[in-house]
């Protein structure tokens, strides 16, 4: 469906982003695939130096960009940020957008924008959801509870958008689950030399625990942190942070690449454990999910179970 007639104008690629990792992935997509005249829309729930850093990185290779702070009350934010939203609508009306690329296909406002642009649609990885078939099915079922918003604004549903996508950009195409085309590879520029000049460092990866894990899993993961020790690297959307965290403007992939010490990274099922290179990686299998365990083994993780927490023989 095309709402505005266009033609004879410069073609653009519109990126719809919501996290620092997404901005870093899109930066590498543009560098690797040379997509035409990027435009960037970044929606932020709670702006941070990290978000601003990676938005600025993507903005540095873009024709134009808009950073919108939504906060917790999305509809109220529409009025607060009306000038920026007017800029976005201006893009849709006046610019020839040839393709819209997004990760959060479940987000209804992104689906509305993708539909109203009347352009082709491509998707990209949205965290670990793309690497577990079990998560993917739950994702489609839960997110389309807001199907009425899609119909109200004449936009795609989540499943419709996945199926009309012409391309999916993946960090690990060999592991990726999609409902559309075969995924194409995106390589992050975060390779790390095998150096170790300053001792050893343990890094625990945070998660939005209250959203994705049972309380017993969370309790055992936190117990592992106390038993093993190290620094705690929080997830961008982690609301309740149980420990003192490391304050870094870098995403974990770039933090690891820049670190001089020998690294051991511990975590639950996450994109970071899949994408991190140049570090010894440990996956806590605390929920008995066989598919996730096999994926983590394929990306080079040592699998730890509950008994390993009390007797960390691997240290």
Image (tube, helix red, strand yellow):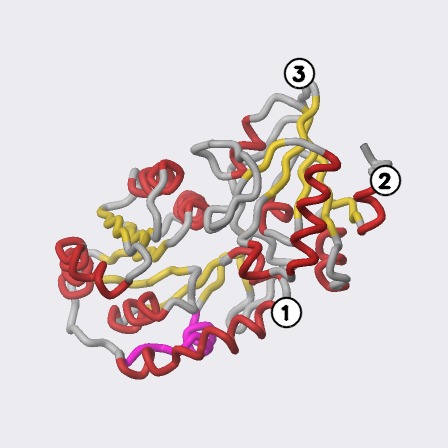
Query: Of the residues under marks 3 and 2, which one precedes in the sequence?
Result: 3
Gap between marks 1 and 3, in whole Å?
40 Å
Outermost residue toward the top in this view: 197
Q: Residues within 10 Å of mark 3 (few under 14, many from 20)?
A: few
Q: How far from the left and from the top, in percent, is residue 308?
A: 83, 44
Which quadrant would residue 121 be assigned to in this image? bottom left
* Quarter of the figure that contains the C terminus: top right
The crowd level at tag 2 (other Cα within 10 Å; few <14, some 14-19, many 20+) is few
In reply to whether residue 161 is colored magenta, the answer given is yes
Residue 9 x, y percent position in the rendering: 16, 60
Mark toward the start of the polypeptide (1 vs 2): 1
Left or right: 213 with respect to 159?
A: right
From the viewer's side, name the closer residue of 10 and 299.
299
Element under label 3? loop
Question: Along the line of sight, which residue is nearer the eye, 186 or 208?
Answer: 208
Q: Secondary structure at mark 2?
A: loop
The alpha-carbon separation of the residues under discs 3 and 2 comes to 28 Å
Circles 1, 3 touching at the beta carbon (< 8 Å): no
- Residue holding disc 3: 197
User: Looking at the rendered structure, which numbered label has been put on residue 313?
Assistant: none
On the image, which quarter does residue 133 sit in? bottom right
Report which residue position mark 2 lands on: 311
Residue 287 in the figure: left or right of residue 246: right
Residue ID at (15%, 73%)? 5
From the viewer's perspective, tell me whether residue 115 is left or right of residue 3: right
Rendered position, 231 above or below 48? above
Q: Which residues are magenta?
A: 154-165
Of callouts 1 and 3, which one flags the residue occurring earlier in the amino acid sequence?
Answer: 1
Residue at image position (69%, 32%) is: 229
The foreground one among 198 and 57 is: 198
Q: Which residue is mark 1?
A: 133
């Amino acid at each position: 469906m095309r709402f505005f007639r266009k033609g004879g104008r410069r073609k653009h690629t519109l990126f719809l982003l919501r996290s620092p990792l997404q901005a870093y992935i899109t930066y590498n997509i543009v560098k690797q695939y040379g997509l035409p005249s990027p435009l960037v829309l970044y929606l932020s729930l709670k702006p941070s130096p990290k978000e601003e850093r990676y938005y600025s990185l993507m903005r540095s290779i873009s024709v134009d960009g808009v950073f919108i702070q939504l906060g917790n009350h999305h509809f109220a934010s529409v009025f607060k940020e009306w000038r920026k939203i007017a800029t976005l609508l201006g893009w849709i009306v006046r610019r020839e957008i040839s393709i819209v690329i997004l990760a959060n296909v479940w987000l209804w406002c992104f689906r509305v924008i993708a539909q109203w642009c009347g352009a082709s649609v491509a998707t990209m990885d949205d965290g670990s959801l793309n690497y577990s078939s079990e998560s993917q099915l739950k994702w489609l079922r839960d997110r389309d509870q807001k199907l009425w918003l899609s119909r109200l604004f004449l936009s795609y549903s989540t499943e419709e958008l996945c199926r009309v996508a012409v391309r999916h950009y993946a960090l690990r195409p060999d592991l990726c689950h999609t409902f559309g085309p075969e995924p194409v590879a995106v390589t992050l520029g975060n390779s790390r030399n095998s150096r170790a000049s300053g001792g050893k460092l343990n890094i625990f990866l945070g998660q939005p625990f209250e959203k994705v894990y049972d309380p017993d899993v969370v309790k055992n993961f936190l117990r592992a942190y106390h038993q093993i020790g190290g620094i705690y690297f929080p997830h961008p959307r982690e609301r309740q942070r149980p420990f003192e965290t490391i304050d870094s403007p870098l995403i974990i992939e770039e933090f690891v690449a820049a670190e001089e010490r020998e690294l051991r990274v511990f975590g639950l099922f996450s994109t970071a454990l899949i994408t991190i290179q140049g570090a010894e990686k440990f996956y806590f299998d605390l929920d008995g999910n066989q598919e996730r365990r096999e994926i983590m083994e394929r990306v080079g993780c040592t699998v730890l179970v509950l008994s390993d927490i009390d007797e960390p023989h691997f240290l």
